[in-house]
Image (cartoon, grey):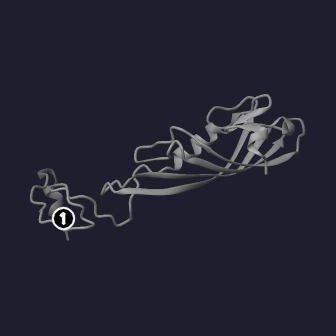
Amino acid sequence: MMSPSSTSTGLRILVADLVKRPGSARSVVLDEPVDGLVVAGSRVAADDPVHLELDLERILEGLVVRGTVEARWAGACARCVQPVAGSVVVAVDELFERDPVEGETYQLAHDTIDLEPLVRDTILLELPQAPLCRPDCAGLCPTCGVDRNDTECECTDDDLDPRWAALRSLEL
């Protein structure tokens, strides 16, 4: 395990020792905040660190980074708007090379790699866009706004859109 203060700055990792010796490897464990991890329904707080446990290995093409990226997220239930939270843990296996292929590999600078683009790509793809407080959440009544998980309301569905009338006749 490496000491972040001696060989890294934030998510920029010094890898000069690995670049000079093909076949060499090292483990990295970091906890760093990453700002801007937000999708439609959930977000990772800017001051909440993302946890990385990675193995760096020098290969002929560049540097392979394997391991896990973990982050806690929070949001609002897409149905009842109550607070909801969770975490994502994602396995990564990526190549950093001097001439990266856009969308496929990451940049290996002279003696550093920047893990922020990897973290950003990984976490943003896994954050829920419409999180639910529970799978059977009944949501809010569209008429009176009561939380149907707590209370049953007296509202009816009499004002259904007439465009759906033909489909209602198919109900069993």
The type of residue carrying mark 1 is Leu
Q: How far across and how far down the image is residue 10, in percent?
A: 67, 38
User: Can you say which quadrant of the picture contains the C terminus?
Assistant: bottom left
Q: Determine the image quadrant of residue 83.
A: bottom left
Q: Kindly identify the residue that appears in the image at 15 percent across and 50 percent down.
A: 163
Q: Kindly identify the residue that appears in the image at 32 percent across and 54 percent down.
A: 81
Seen from this angle, which residue lies furthest bottom?
172
Above/below status of 8 relative to 88: above
9 left or right of 33 in image: right
Seen from this angle, which residue lies furthest right?
21
Seen from this angle, which residue lies furthest left?
158
Q: Kindly identify the residue that appears in the image at 28 percent across and 60 percent down.
A: 139
65 left or right of 25 in image: left
Q: How far across and how far down the image is residue 115, in percent?
A: 67, 39
20 left or right of 73 in image: right
Q: How far across and how far down the image is residue 164, in percent?
A: 16, 54
Above/below status of 31 relative to 138: above
Residue picked out by circle 1 = 170
Taking depth in this image into account, of 129 and 30 the one nearest to the observer is 30
Figure disc tally? 1
Q: Determine the image quadrant of residue 95.
A: top right
Q: How far across and how far down the image is residue 129, in percent?
A: 42, 49
- Secondary structure at numbered mark 1: loop
Q: Determine the image quadrant of residue 133.
A: bottom left
Graded by Cα atoms within 10 Å as few (under 14), some (14 to 19) or many (20 or more), the crowding at tag 1 reads few
119 left or right of 137 in image: right
